Amino acid sequence: ATRPTAHDLFFAIDFVLKNVKKKLAEEGFQKNRMKMFVVKLSEKYSKIIEEKCQRIGRIGEKVIETGSRILTHCNAGALGCVDYGTALAVIKFAHRKGKRFVVYVDETRPRFQGSKLTSWELAHEGIDCYIIADNAAGYYMQRGLIDLVIVGADRIAMNGDVVNKIGTYEKAVLAKEHGIPFYVAAPLSTIDPKIESGEDVPIEFRDEDEIHYITGLNESSDKIERVRITPQQSKALNPGFDITPARYITGIITEEGIFKPNELKKIVERSINVQGIL
């Protein structure tokens, strides 16, 4: 697979393929009708995920209080998911309920999803936010300037381990050290019932050029430009994700409620919206 780590991508494809196979068995192949059927299926799936994200926001906003200082990592908003997103749904719903707080946004190297995407979404919502360097989170935690951490997830194992954007693990370790709650927001479809532990999840290694080059606006020419920031002879390693063990996670915010990591296996066994999205 081109993106082996994120479970929801597989879940979405399986949803479409399962329904297409059923349609083919019932009616046979009719090219134009099948095209429209796939489009409608995709729209239906998008709507379902949109509703799940909104439920995550409504349930999760309770962990945020007026005056909270929140750290988030990568982009788990509308630009990375749909509608409100997951982690950002929690933040957006809290803000829309009238709570006022500040969000610290990790830049999230090497693709800068935090500084480029999350900061834009929060500013668009009128939420007070600051972009911080990836390696600055410990500084703010040590000085008591962060009250909670909220991130998304690309895949969750049955034991509660969370696989998310590279850099998530170190934030969780720092949060644990400083007694700061660490929440993960994700739909139940992110739980992979075939994966017992985070160590079983394939981690995508991305092109090393993402480390060697950055892209940004040249304010003199008003053009987007790509520049190299490392020596020509240098090599780079670029894992896209890391594994946060369940012991570092305070709670997982889902569309069905907030669960402790060790409760997930029981939820899957009860088949609460995990085996099928409908």
Image (spheres, rainbow, N blue to C red):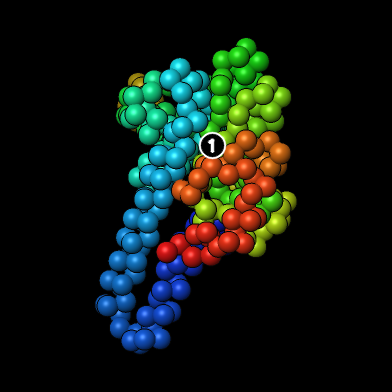
Q: Is residue 67 left or right of residue 135?
A: left
Figure quadrant of the N terminus: bottom right
> Residue 261, relative to residue 4: is it above or below?
above
Q: Amino acid at mark 1?
A: Val
Image coordinates for residue 23, horizontal then vertical, percent:
37, 80
Q: Residue at x 64, y 45 (%)?
A: 261
Q: How many marks?
A: 1
Q: Residue at x 62, y 18 (%)?
A: 141
Residue receiving disc 1: 151
Q: Is residue 57 left or right of residue 32?
A: right
Q: Residue at x 33, y 61 (%)?
A: 44
Figure quadrant of the C terminus: bottom left
Name, please, the residue furthest toward the top.
143
Foreground residue, 81 or 158? 158
Is residue 45 visible in the rendered image? The answer is: yes
Image coordinates for residue 227, horizontal then vertical, percent:
50, 31
As helix, strand or loop, the secondary structure at mark 1 comes to strand
Foreground residue, 94 or 6? 94
Which of the 4 image quarters holds residue 235?
top right
Foreground residue, 170 or 211? 170
Image coordinates for residue 126, horizontal then vertical, percent:
32, 24
Is residue 212 visible in the rendered image? The answer is: no
Q: Residue at x 40, y 30 (%)?
A: 94
> Residue 203, relative to residue 107: is it above or below?
below
Image coordinates for residue 79, horizontal then vertical, percent:
39, 42
Estimate how packed mark 1 is, as few (under 14), some (14 to 19) or many (20 or more) residues with alpha carbons within 10 Å: many
